[in-house]
Image (cartoon, rainbow, N blue to C red):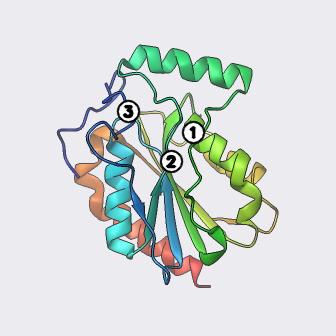
């Protein structure tokens, strides 16, 4: 993880949801049983996702929004608020999403926006939540100081009753670098629970 990433309320992005200078992350292997699906606007959640993928040897898939969020924080907040109020979640480019049936454990990485998972993750759950039946599911999130919000309730509401929603992990983005060991402990616990 890098402390050079923009942090806290007002964080700017690259205007392409971390993809201005690199391609979206697509790490998919035939034998993996854990998949990390994540969205990151300014790079903090992506740093966590990379740590998790490397630590667990997991596959990783970055959600791509058809129309990326603006560089400017305020403009991003305004757009996200309109989407949320109108329940018009952003279109995702998911033609290359791997077959979710391969995985036993799925980790969702996302920022917290207005006390709930970021809109692109909400769209992912609306679109693919039914495919998580019988899976173990957990969320890790970055926030600007207000915690995980209603993440657990959203996951439970948008997935089948047979989905096992495990405890989540949420950290204020300014604390990412000094809490890597705590994050890894959560990953260990989550991975352990996935094999029960």
Residue closest to the far front: 95
Q: Is residue 117 visible?
A: no
Pick the front one: 65 or 161: 65
Q: Secondary structure at mark 2?
A: loop
* Residue position for label 1: 120
Q: Are marks 1 and 2 in contact (CB under 8 Å)?
A: yes
What whole-number distance in Å separates the C-alpha atoms at marks 1 and 2?
Answer: 7 Å
Task: Give the side of residue 162 with respect to residue 143, left or right.
Answer: right
Rendering coords of residue 154 (x, y %): 69, 45
Per the image, label 1 sits on a secondary structure element best described as helix
Quadrant hosting residue 69: top left
Give me the residue at 77% from left, 59% from top.
Answer: 130
**Residue 62 appears at what percent x and percent y?**
45, 52
Quadrant position of residue 160: bottom right
- According to the image, label 3 marks what residue? 16
- The image shows residue 134, relative to residue 25, as above or below, that is below
Q: Quadrant of the C terminus?
A: bottom right
Tell me residue 56's x, y (percent). Answer: 39, 74
Check residue 63 in the rendering and tell me which mark sits there, or answer none.
Answer: 2
Q: Is residue 187 visible?
A: yes
């Amino acid at each position: 993880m890098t402390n050079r990433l923009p942090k806290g309320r007002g964080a700017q992005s690259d205007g392409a949801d971390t993809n201005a200078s690199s391609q979206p992350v697509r790490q998919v292997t035939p034998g993996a049983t854990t998949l990390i699906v994540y969205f990151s606007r300014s790079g903090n959640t992506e740093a966590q996702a990379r740590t998790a993928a490397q630590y667990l040897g997991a596959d990783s898939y970055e959600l791509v929004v058809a129309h990326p969020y603006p560089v400017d924080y305020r403009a991003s907040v305004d757009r996200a608020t309109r989407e949320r109020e109108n329940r018009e979640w952003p279109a995702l480019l998911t033609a290359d999403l791997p077959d979710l049936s391969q995985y036993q454990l799925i980790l969702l990485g996302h920022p917290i926006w207005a006390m709930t998972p970021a809109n692109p993750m909400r769209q992912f759950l609306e679109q693919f939540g039914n495919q998580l039946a019988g899976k173990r599911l957990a969320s890790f999130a970055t926030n600007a100081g207000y915690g995980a919000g209603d993440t657990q309730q959203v996951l439970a509401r948008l997935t089948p009753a047979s989905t096992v929603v495990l405890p989540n992990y949420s950290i204020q983005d300014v604390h990412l670098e000094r809490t890597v060991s705590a994050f890894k402990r959560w990953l260990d616990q989550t991975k352990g629970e996935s094999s029960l």
